[in-house]
Image: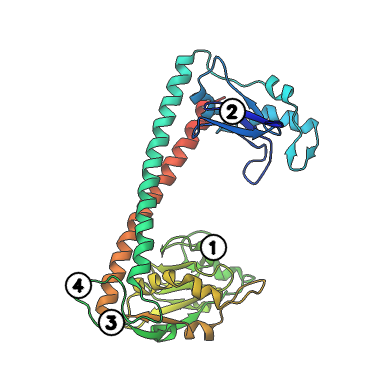
Amino acid sequence: MSNYYLLKKGDFAYNKSYSNGFPLGTVKRLDKYDQGALSSLYIVFRPKKVNTDFLSIYYDTNKWHREVMKLSAEGARNHGLLNIPVNSFFEKNIIIPIHEKEQLEIAKFLKRLEKIIALHQRSFNMLNQKKQVLLRKMFPSLREDIPSIRFNSFEQDWKLSNLGDLGEVLTGNTPSTKMESYWEKGKNGYIWITPSDVFKYKTSESMRYLSEEGWKKARKVPKNSVLITSIASIGKNTINQMPAAFNQQINAIIPKENSAYFILTCMEKNKVQFSSIAGKTATPIINKTDFKKFKVKVPQHPEQLVIGDLFEKIDDILSYYQKKLDVLQKIKSIYLSKMFL
């Protein structure tokens, strides 16, 4: 094949394309296939006198960036590619342990860590996939009266309701940011939730906090209300774990004889339909009137409670897995920065 390189398993390739998160491109080893073909725009090589597992991990760090940065500074960027000559790339210096045994031990240690991370990621993915199936099966469509799967003791039809029928609906506000007396500099005040604070199903902290004076000016809801983002980041929803104020991008439901976690999960299930009523404007928005009219199917309160309880348990486990993954990734990042020069 003209203009292509034939690679064998274990060979490396440098992709000189720069992108978000990879300002100097990437170097990867061919692992999944016995052989492959790459455009001559890549720089390819077969290492000698170095452990390839070690080298693969080395190129996952940014330690090689210094030398490549010198090369890229000397030439212009061409059609999204760094202008780095092949000879110059191979002349760059990298710092590695002299003895292959040390290279091997470093690679083995980090590979074990990667396996642990992969196992936790697999557990997270499997549970999340099961959750998505349950979301489809345990919530009927608007045309259906009962779900495909439900707990044994429930037989009554689900009823069609407006969101506004599930509780009191409030739209948040922003106390004047010009009034310094309304805001606390630390985390000693009252939480004031914006969509930027919503990244978990339960929220108990915020980036900004209100003072006693600011709290009086804010719209607020009691603990265990459902906060639903209705402007811009539509579909980011949460339950506040303490009394909270919130901004105007959020509509809140204070449940009235309905399960907060059921409502939260129901809105996750109906995220696409809910987003569709925002229109295709530059900044998608669902006003309070349309919000209250949004239709969902709901069961009787006892069935809501058991469904909400099931999904809360699932989400708590997923949150635990995610925390573990975050810690493990941080540990890996520290080792990568400390074990390579």
Upstream in the sequence, badge 1 or badge 4? 4
How far apart, in angstroms, are the residues tagged by discs 3 and 1? 33 Å
How far apart, in angstroms, are the residues tagged by discs 1 and 4? 40 Å
Q: Which residue is mark 3?
A: 300
Amino acid carrying label 1: it is Ser
Disc 1 or disc 2, which is closer to the eye?
Answer: 2
Q: How many marks?
A: 4
Measured as percent of width and height from the top left, residue 151 is found at 23, 71
Dot 4: element: loop
Q: Are the residues tagged 4 and 2 within 8 Å (C-beta)?
A: no
Amino acid carrying label 3: it is Gln
Q: Is residue 132 above or below residue 62?
A: below
The 10 Å Cα crowd at callout 3, few under 14, some 14 to 19, many 20 or more, is some
Disc 3 or disc 1, which is closer to the eye?
Answer: 3
Q: What number is the disc on residue 7?
A: 2
Side of 308 relative to 247 (left or right): left
User: Residue at position x 41%, y 25% from top?
Assistant: 108
Q: Which residue is mark 1?
A: 196
Q: What number is the disc on residue 88?
A: none
Dot 1: element: helix
Amino acid carrying label 4: it is Asn
How far apart, in angstroms, are the residues tagged by discs 3 and 2? 62 Å
Upstream in the sequence, badge 3 or badge 2? 2
